Structure formats: C-alpha cells, structure tokens
C-alpha cells in the first residue's frame, strides 16, 4: 500500500483569513474532547439511543441491552457526570432521560455522518 503524501507549505505565510479568536480556549477544547471521549464508548451510545426514545429506569435499560444493572449504573454515572443524562425519582424508582435536545442532536448528527 502506497503512503499518501501530505502537502507542506514552502515558507512561512501569514493567514489573515483565520481568526484566532474563533478557536476555542484550551479549557473549552479540553471539555469538548472529554465530551467526545464519553461518546467513544458503544455501550454509552446504546444507552443514549434508548433514552432518546423513552425515559427508562436502570432495570429496563439493563434488560433492553442484555447487561447487568451494575454495568448500566456505572455507565449512567459517567453520563450524568458529563451532563448528558438527567434523572427523576418516582418512589424508589429512578428514571433516566437525555439531559437536553443537544444530546439527541449530537447522536443524530453522528449517525448521519457515519451512515453517509
């Protein structure tokens, strides 16, 4: 397999058309990278996809995905920390749902991209 060559600049150019202020700060970039790392786990994507359809409790998610409640709880903890899911209690049962429309949009955009 032949290696693809990368084009390099010959000399130094000043690129006025790139606005440095439009590049996010290091802190924002770090947070964004962590968000994408969270989406980098297929189990978490499956959980988010299920929650996109309906609010569910841990036992329903575990049954749906064929996993233990413990494994689901661990992944939900990560998703809560990243503010991708929210929860509400009804008696002793905790129901999970997507935190907001942004999460659904990210999922849909990602799926559109990989299905092109």
Image: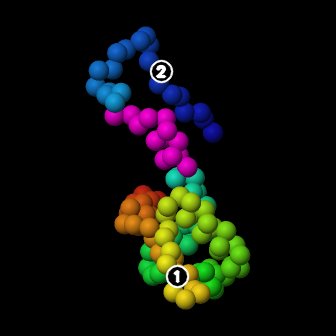
Between 111 and 51, the one nearer to me in the picture: 51
Which residue lies most toward the top here?
A: 11
Which residue lies most toward the front here?
A: 91
Indicate the secondary structure of the residue bearing disc 1.
Answer: strand
Q: Can residue 29 be found in the magenta stretch?
A: yes
Q: Position of residue 104 (x, y in %)?
A: 41, 67
- The span picked out in magenta is 22-34
**Which residue corresponds to mark 2?**
8
Between 116 and 3, the one nearer to me in the picture: 116
Residue at the (52%, 82%) spot, across then down? 89
Q: Position of residue 49 (x, y in %)?
A: 49, 73
Give the side of residue 17 with respect to residue 85, left or right.
left
Q: Would you call the spot at circle 2 few (<14 residues within 10 Å), some (14-19), or many (20 or more)?
A: few
Give the side of residue 61 with respect to residue 99, left or right.
right
Q: Quadrant of residue 78?
A: bottom right
Height in image: 38 above or below 93?
A: above
Indicate the secondary structure of the residue bearing disc 2.
Answer: loop
Residue at the (34%, 15%) spot, across then down? 14
Give the side of residue 88 with respect to residue 14, left or right.
right
Residue 31 shows in the view: yes
């Amino acid at each position: 397999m032949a290696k693809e060559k990368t084009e390099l600049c010959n000399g130094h150019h000043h690129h006025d058309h790139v606005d440095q202020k439009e590049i996010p700060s290091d802190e924002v970039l770090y947070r964004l990278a962590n968000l994408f790392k969270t989406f980098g786990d297929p189990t978490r994507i499956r959980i988010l996809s299920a929650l996109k359809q309906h609010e569910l409790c841990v036992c329903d998610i575990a049954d749906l995905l064929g996993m233990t409640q413990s494994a689901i709880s661990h992944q939900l903890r990560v998703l809560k920390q990243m503010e991708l899911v929210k929860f509400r209690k009804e008696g002793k049962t905790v129901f999970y749902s997507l935190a907001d429309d942004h999460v659904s949009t990210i999922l849909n955009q990602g799926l559109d991209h990989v299905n092109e």
